[in-house]
Structures are given as structure tokens and as C-alpha cells.
Image (spheres, rainbow, N blue to C red):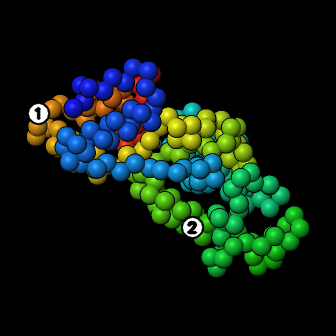
């Protein structure tokens, strides 16, 4: 049981694996965990987040409209901007929902990006990828520093450095109910036994009940 595991001197992946093993052995629950995040994945969904939502408290993209916090449309659709890591063809859409076409440093006539169609498409990128909070949850940058078309000051994702994981929210709720039924304390007490915690649980603008890190 949990008391056997001493998180002292153990790294994040050892802690999370011990937690997942114990949840399975003691409570019969397999908790799903994100896997195989790449720089490309992270930067793609970060740029999408910064274009549509930006739930970061104090971080803004380099180009925003006055009073706004998201990447401005004039910058996002500027054909002269060279995007880093991410490809405009994954984001921009024409009014007919096709990929815009460049003609030198301009958009080809009739193939210009359309704001409404692009917003709709980018929204679906986030929901299809299973980003939390119906696609609106924060996604950290895959680059350090973040590049075009965002160029915000947000730090590189902890997921990429192997020091954070997103756990399946439904599985966590089931586990939480089992802990309560067994009078075994809260989910956070349980996580703490493995040297883990949820630093974004009460985040003011973008709470993440699924995001777990090693306790410092
Ligand atoms: Zn950024
Ligand atoms: Zn996370």
C-alpha cells in the first residue's frame, strides 16, 4: 500500500508510476495518463490557445489588438509572417474552408484566410485533441522561447520536460469516490503520499484538476 512508497529522492515518473500502480492494486482503478507529447503537438495547441482564448494571467502574445489578449487577426493572417514549428496550413482556413494559398509574400486572390472559418477550425483542433475544459484549457508553449505567430513569454511546457502529467478526469473522479467510500481521505491526500500534487487545481482563470506534478 501507499505507505511503502517513499517519494524522497524519487523523480516525477517514478512517483506517478507508483501512484498509478497503487490506484490499480488498491482500488482497482486504471487512471489514464497523457503520453507522447511532442514539441510539435505542444506548440500547435499552444498557438491555437493563444489565438482563441489566452487563459494566462500575465502572459500575452507579441501582437494583440488594443484591449485584447489573444493573437490579433491581422498578425495571424499576415502572409509575410514566417511561423516557427507550426504551419499556417494547420490553422488558417478560407471562407470556403480550404487551406489558404500564398502567392509570393501575398495571399493568392480568392484564397485568402477568413477569420470566422479559421476560428471555427482552430476551435475544433482543441476539442478534437481532448484539451480540457471543452478545449479552452491553457496549453504551454513547446518552444523556449515561444515563436511566431505567438511569441509570448510563457515558459516551455512541463509536460515536455517529463515533470508533469495530465490524468484522465473521469478516472480521477471515480478514484476520488472510492477513496471516500473507503474513508481513505481525499484524492490530494492520496497523491501527497507519492510526493505528487495538483498545482493548478485552484488556478484563478484556468483551473486544471487533471494536471499533476511532483511536489517541490
Ligand atoms: Zn506563446
Ligand atoms: Zn497539464
Question: Horizontal placement of 7 versus 181: left or right?
Answer: right
Q: Describe the element under mark 1 as helix, strand or loop.
A: loop
Question: Horizontal placement of 185 versus 104: left or right?
Answer: left
Residue drawn at point x = 67 percent, y = 52 percent = 72
Residues 75 and 193: in front is 193
CA neighbours of label 2 inside 10 A, class few (<14), some (14 to 19), many (20+): some
Seen as rendered, the residue at the extreme right is: 104
Residues 136 and 30: in front is 30
Residue drawn at point x = 39 percent, y = 32 percent = 15
State the residue position of label 1: 183
Q: Is residue 88 visible?
A: yes
Residue drawn at point x = 69 percent, y = 56 percent = 86
Q: Describe the element under mark 2 as helix, strand or loop.
A: helix
The image position of residue 82, as x and y in percent, is: 80, 54
Question: Horizontal placement of 81 versus 194: left or right?
Answer: right
Name above or below for residue 58 compared with residue 117. above
Q: Are marks 1 and 2 in contact (CB under 8 Å)?
A: no
Residue drawn at point x = 62 percent, y = 76 percent = 97
The quarter of the picture where residue 205 lies is: top left
* Number of marks in picture: 2
> From the image, which quarter does the C terminus lie in?
top left
State the residue position of label 2: 121
Amino acid at each position: 500500500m501507499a505507505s511503502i512508497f517513499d517519494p524522497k529522492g524519487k523523480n516525477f515518473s517514478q512517483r506517478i508510476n507508483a501512484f498509478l500502480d497503487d490506484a490499480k492494486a488498491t482500488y482497482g482503478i486504471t487512471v489514464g495518463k497523457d503520453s507522447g507529447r511532442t514539441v510539435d503537438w505542444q506548440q500547435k495547441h499552444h498557438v491555437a490557445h493563444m489565438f482563441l482564448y489566452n487563459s494566462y494571467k500575465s502572459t500575452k502574445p507579441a501582437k494583440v489588438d488594443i484591449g485584447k489578449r489573444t493573437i490579433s487577426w491581422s498578425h495571424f493572417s499576415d502572409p509575410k509572417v514566417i511561423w516557427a514549428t507550426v504551419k499556417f496550413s494547420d490553422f488558417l482556413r478560407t471562407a470556403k474552408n480550404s487551406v489558404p494559398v500564398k502567392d509570393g509574400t501575398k495571399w493568392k486572390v480568392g484564397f485568402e484566410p477568413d477569420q470566422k472559418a479559421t476560428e471555427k477550425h482552430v476551435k475544433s483542433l482543441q476539442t478534437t485533441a481532448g484539451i480540457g475544459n471543452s478545449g479552452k484549457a491553457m496549453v504551454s508553449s513547446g518552444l523556449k522561447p515561444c515563436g511566431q505567430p505567438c511569441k509570448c513569454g510563457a515558459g516551455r511546457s512541463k509536460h515536455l520536460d517529463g515533470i508533469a502529467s495530465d490524468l484522465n478526469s473521469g478516472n480521477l473522479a471515480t478514484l476520488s469516490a472510492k477513496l471516500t467510500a473507503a474513508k481513505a481521505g481525499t484524492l490530494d491526500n492520496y497523491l501527497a503520499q507519492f510526493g505528487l500534487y495538483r498545482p493548478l487545481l485552484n488556478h484563478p482563470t484556468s483551473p486544471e484538476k487533471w494536471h499533476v506534478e511532483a511536489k517541490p
